[in-house]
Amino acid sequence: MHLADDTLLQLLLLGCLLGATFIAQIVLIVRQEQSTKGIERAFLFPEVNEGDGPRHSPSGNVPWNIAVDLSNSGKTPAIIRLLRGYADVLLVTANPPDKVHTFPGSDDEIAPGVAIPKDTGYTIMVQVRLTDTQWAQIEGGNAVLYVLGRIEYDDVFQHRHKTGYCWQYARQGGMWKFVISQKTKLNYST
């Protein structure tokens, strides 16, 4: 009787060990899949450039088309779902922007038809109309031109990601150019 009980106990123990090994393998596979998805996903980064400007006029009727170049440094395409961007001029005494303004239709999603493949880019144009007075304030250091917005995109694993951006027109190294705004929470990526 003892031999049968010992064999049954050994088989039961062996079954428990095999079950624990199987569960551990499943956990490792799931973690590896999550890690692979994180490495393989799309990563969008915006870079703001002068476009066709700077442009300004006495009345502010001349448009300056500022280029926001979106580059995908990930390994899979980014499927664009929301593109928002605009320019704003604020006095230097004001705080930098801390939120992206909303307006009717600004949060409407795009049908999944525009994709940015890996290692390529897509450009959106943000238009601003500056008066000569505003331009003089910017050049004199009394006002700041900001370009800000948000991009939402899906990766091929059907996960939604968001990238926020806020750049400002500033003099660096004796040249005017757009640089990332340092004092705002609008620069982020999920």
Image (cartoon, grey):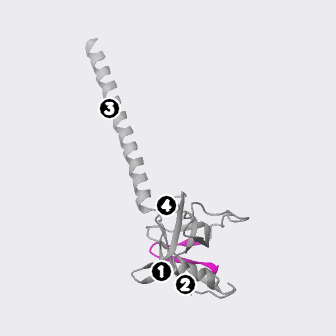
First along the sequence among labels 2 and 4: 2
Disc 1 to disc 3, how far (Cα)?
A: 64 Å
Q: Residue type at mark 2?
A: Gly
First along the sequence among labels 4 and 3: 3
Q: Residue type at mark 1?
A: Lys
Residue denoted by label 4: 189
Disc 4 to disc 3, how far (Cα)?
A: 43 Å
Residue ID at (71%, 64%): 103
Considering depth in this image, is 170 or 34 the residue closer to the camera?
A: 170
Callout 1–callout 2 Cβ contact below 8 Å: no
Picture coordinates of residue 125 (x, y %)? 60, 79
Side of 184 where 112 appears, left or right:
right
Question: Which residue appears farthest toward the left when viewing the image?
Answer: 3
Disc 2 to disc 4, how far (Cα)?
A: 24 Å
First along the sequence among labels 2 and 3: 3
Q: Which mark's residue is nearer the viewer, 2 or 3? A: 2
Circle 2 Cα neighbour tier, 10 Å, few/some/many (<14 / 14–19 / ≥20): some
